[in-house]
């Protein structure tokens, strides 16, 4: 089942040896010479896999790599059971907006800084702080290992079922110390 498609890759779900799996397949570029496209796709696929492994070694939560299929330009990754941080924050914001509209106030005016979001869902304030801490810790670990993600957005962070924040989308990651790739 196809989950998404971008200019760089198709992402779909499947099973790998009986385990839920996400497959990221690099899209062939028709405007490139086939030999060049194959070489670039291969290099970027291997780079992404290396960067995921480097992040894991640095203690950053990332999906496990099940398989790197160089012939088909596919990366088989562990499926993170949960949603994106972006979706989580959107839901929390909608809860807060609904609450603020019910109360007739649309601004955050409470001393704790979380304002009406906390009233809409009392768990959101502390959970959001926990998420912010997890994100900061993951970024610090990456930077300590001289890794620069390159596309670190809430869409590239998944909340796993055990409430941890995993970093995904390593296609633009660079190893910063020498300006090269992982």
Image (spheres, helix red, strand yellow):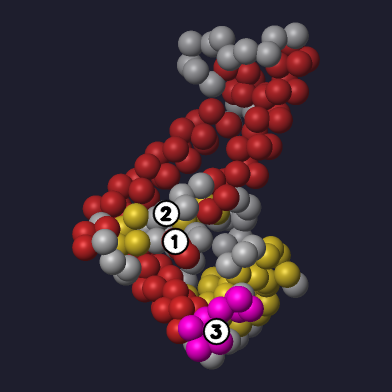
Residue 43 spot, x, y in % from top left:
42, 79
Residue 23 spot, x, y in % from top left:
60, 75
Q: Which span of residues is magenta-colored? A: 28-38
Q: Residue at point 54% right, 46% down? A: 154
Q: Is residue 34 above or below residue 10?
A: below
User: Label 3: how many residues lie within 10 Å, few (<14), some (14-19) or many (20+)?
Assistant: few
How many angstroms separate mark 3 from mark 1 (CA)? 22 Å
Query: Which tag, 1 or 2, sits closer to the chain's start?
Result: 2
Inspect this view and state whether residue 97 appears. Answer: yes
Residue 150 numbered mark, or none: 2
Instruction: Name the quadrant containing residue 3.
Output: bottom right
- Nearer to us: label 3 or label 1: 3
Inspect this view and state whether residue 42 appears. Answer: no
Q: Would residue 31 be counted in the magenta stretch?
A: yes
Query: Which tag, 3 or 2, sits closer to the chain's start?
Result: 3
Which residue lies under the disc numbered 3? 33
Labels 1 & 2 near each other (Cβ < 8 A): yes
Q: Residue at point 61% right, 38% down? A: 89
Q: Residue at point 21% right, 63% down? A: 178
Labels 3 & 2 near each other (Cβ < 8 A): no
Check disc 2 and report its element: helix, strand or loop: loop
Q: Would residue 63 be counted in the magenta stretch?
A: no
Residue 19 spot, x, y in % from top left:
61, 77
Check disc 1 and report its element: helix, strand or loop: helix
Q: Is residue 122 left or right of residue 137?
A: right
How many angstroms separate mark 1 from mark 2 (CA)? 5 Å
Which residue lies under the disc numbered 1? 172
Residue 145 numbered mark, or none: none
Image quarter (top left, top right, bottom left or bottom right) of the N terminus: bottom right
């Amino acid at each position: 089942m196809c989950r998404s498609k971008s200019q760089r890759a198709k992402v779909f779900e499947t099973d790998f040896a009986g385990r839920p799996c996400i497959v990221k397949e690099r899209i062939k570029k028709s405007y490139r010479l086939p030999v060049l496209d194959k070489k670039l796709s291969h290099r970027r696929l291997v780079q992404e896999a290396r960067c995921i492994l480097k992040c894991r070694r640095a203690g950053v939560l990332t999906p496990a790599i099940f398989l790197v299929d160089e012939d088909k330009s596919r990366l088989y990754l562990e499926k993170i059971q949960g949603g994106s941080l972006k979706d989580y924050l959107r839901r929390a914001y909608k809860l807060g907006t609904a609450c603020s509209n019910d109360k007739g106030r649309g601004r955050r005016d409470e001393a704790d800084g979380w304002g009406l979001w906390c009233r809409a869902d009392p768990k959101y304030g502390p959970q959001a702080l926990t998420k912010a801490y997890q994100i900061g810790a993951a970024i610090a670990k990456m930077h300590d290992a001289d890794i620069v993600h390159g596309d670190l957005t809430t869409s590239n962070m998944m909340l796993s079922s055990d409430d941890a924040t995993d970093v995904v989308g390593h296609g633009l990651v660079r190893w910063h110390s020498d300006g090269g790739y992982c």
